Image (tube, grey):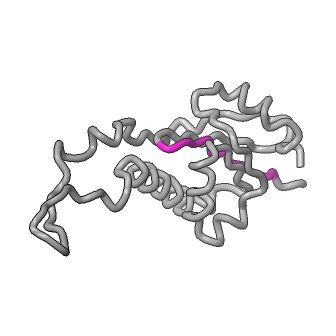
Amino acid sequence: MVRKIVTWILVADGARARVLLNEGVGKGVRELSDRAFVGSRMRSRDMVSDRPGRTFDRGGQGRHAMEPTSDPHDEAERAFLHDVVAWLAEHEHAFDRLIVIAAPRALGELRRAMPRALAEKVTSEIDADLTKAKPAEIEARLGDVLAV
């Protein structure tokens, strides 16, 4: 008897992620109902205090506002995607293959965050934001990727 190949499909952007399941050729895809990820949709300006910190000039008496070292919105997206990857890594025993569909920026961050064992299960990547698409639309977008 042929063993079925279980494929998980991660669909993500910087603040939403879903995992869909395919249990073999011709089985279609369905959403894993036990897990959906939702991050913050706040704007950067809403994530920080009203005024930036102040500092003295090195060469004089003046003071000026300090520039933030990073964008809080980018940091929130990065943390969200790292949480998604950590959850996938905890459950990597449950699937044989992983297909990643993500918005371009999120796709790059997911690649950087994945441990080697999880990255080796990735069989296909699609740079598209399909987080609001229905499972049937995602299945149609995958085309022959699931048949392999």
In the image, is 53 to the left or to the right of 30?
left
Task: Name the residue at 13% across, 61% down.
Answer: 63
Along the line of sight, the residue nearer the viewer: 5 or 43 = 43
Residue 115, quarter of the rendered image: bottom right
Along the line of sight, the residue nearer the viewer: 140 or 29 = 140
The image shows residue 78 at horizontal and vertical percentages of 46, 55
Residue 88, quarter of the rendered image: bottom right
In the rendered image of this protein, does residue 94 appear above or below residue 56?
A: above
Q: Is residue 44 magenta?
A: no
In the image, is 75 to the left or to the right of 26?
left
Which image quadrant: the N terminus? bottom right
In the image, is 74 to the left or to the right of 9?
left
Question: What residue range appears in magenta?
Answer: 4-14
In the rendered image of this protein, does residue 134 appear above or below residue 66?
A: above
The image shows residue 35 at horizontal and vertical percentages of 49, 42
Task: Name the residue at 58% across, 33% down.
Answer: 131
Task: Name the residue at 49% across, 53% down.
Answer: 81
Number of callouts: 0
Task: Name the residue at 29% across, 57% down.
Answer: 67
The image shows residue 64 at horizontal and vertical percentages of 18, 58
In the rendered image of this protein, does residue 53 appear above or below residue 31?
A: below
Along the line of sight, the residue nearer the viewer: 28 or 82 = 82
